[in-house]
Amino acid sequence: MEAVNVNACPRCGSRDWTGRSLRISLPSTSCLDRNPRLLSFGLEYKSQTVFNMAAELTSTKLNPESHIILDQPLLRLPHELVRRNFKTVQRAVEREKEYVIPALKETASASLSNTQTPDQTLAALDAMISRMQGLKRKMESLQEEEKEIHNQSRKRIQHLEALHKIPSLADVKYDQWSRVRLDRLLIDHMLRSGYSESAKQLAQDRGVEDLVDLGVFTQCQRVVDSLRRGETKEALQWCGENKAALKKSQHNLEFELRLQQYIEMVRTQDKSKKIEAIIHAKKYLIPNHQSQNPEIMRAAGLLVFTQDTRAEPYKSLFALSRWKYLARLFIQTHHELLSLPSQPLLHIALSAGLSALKTPLCHSAFTSSSSNSQSTSTSVCPICSTELNELARKMPYAHHSKSYVESDPIVLPNGRVYGKQRLIEISRKMGSVESGNVKDPTTGQVFQESEMKKVYIM
């Protein structure tokens, strides 16, 4: 038999393949002379080997569509920003059109009928020209913003298109693409957590500024910070810029902000401030009586209570924790209007892996052997780690189509099943268990060996 070392890629012939060396034994010429049947054996073995190699390549074939599911917001947000940019231009043009055309007709009629002097006519024309120049500057600014959004969209499409050119998960290019995606997910998580400067620095270091939404999340965080400081100005300004979208989506963010302004006026217990609060309520709260009538009635009752009251719901309305509620409500409204996921993409990406590893013991009420001071080993389960344990709590358990049972299963009085020999060995290694007893490695309970009962699986 002759041995042949094969460590070249069967597809391209490159010797820099997966790093595995395959040794194939083929019949030698002398062997074939003595036994010709070895020829068919050698060809069959070689064919089977090639088939196995092809199957391995097939199992690592990349499916781009399954990867892009996670990256939908990458293109959805630029599309939403372009749409809003166009709506802003449209509103600006319509507003100036409604002013300029009637003003131009009025000026022309007055000039023809000699009802105004030439200086007045020139002043009116100058005012119209000034407004049109202001519209031009605004449209130029919006055009530059649109160009920047289109440039980001092009970079993001190129990033996703590169995935379709990668044939296999074993390809080096896939590792590079995955690192870029991991950087994006980390930056997204940092932005949502409020670490804007760190996220910006990481994006610059990795060169992925066009693949992440720094501006959008930075603006969102600025408004959130102002709400946590007890200020409503920036949040109300944002509501004014997105008034049409908020009205269409039936969000009550602006009402809650106006209600908070009313609460702060009443909190002072100053008579003039209470009068101002009533005027404020008539202007901003009463128009929403059809959809927010219960809240308006509570706000009216707030006038006769002080901020140290224990009566509900007025105690909750005066509570400073309402500012945190407003911050959460703003984040929810902001993300929904811009079609952003409510959870960080990093959490979504981790969920599949967490579910594949999760077992009932990961969130057991008992102390696991990994946290027991007498344990003989250290747990490497990521689900049991403090960083991921809470994230995985609502995840489904891993699906196992096959069960692996010890050859000598026994059940303890507490209902837990273990392999007899393995349980005895663990109990001996712990050292604190007397002879003839065993210790449950999960709960720490000690039982006599005579209390163990053999398990029969039908």
Image (spheres, grey):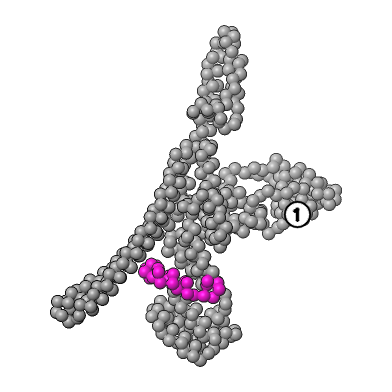
Residue 180 seen by the camera: yes
SS type, badge 1: loop
Residue 265 located left or right of residue 383: left
In the image, residue 192 lies at what x, y percent? Answer: 53, 61
Write the residue at 59% across / 26% down: 22
Magenta span: predominant SS is: helix
- The picture places residue 199, in percent across and down from the top left corner, at 55, 57
Quarter occupied by the C terminus: top right
Q: Where residue 149 sits: x, y (%)?
A: 40, 55
- Does 243 lie within the magenta span? yes
* Residue that badge 1 annotates: 372
Task: Find the magenta span and give its range.
Answer: 226-251
Image side of residue 410 versus residue 354, left or right: right
- Depicted 54 relative to depicted 371: above or below: above
Whether the magenta-drawn stretch holds residue 95 is answered as no
Among all residues in the image, which is located at the extreme left? 113
State the residue lying farthest toward the top: 33
Q: Quadrant of the N terminus?
A: top right
Amino acid on which the number 1 mark rests in the picture: Asn
User: As rendered, which of 163 and 448 lies closer to the eye?
Assistant: 163
Task: Bin the neighbour count of mark 1 within 10 Å (Cα to Cα): few under 14, some 14-19, many 20 and up.
Answer: some
- The quarter of the displayed image where residue 228 is located: bottom right
The residue sitting at 42% across, 81% down in the picture is 285
Q: What is the quadrant of residue 404 in the picture?
A: top right
Q: Is residue 87 visible?
A: no
* Residue at the spot 46% in from the left edge and 87% down from the top edge: 276
**Image side of residue 368 versus residue 34, left or right:** right
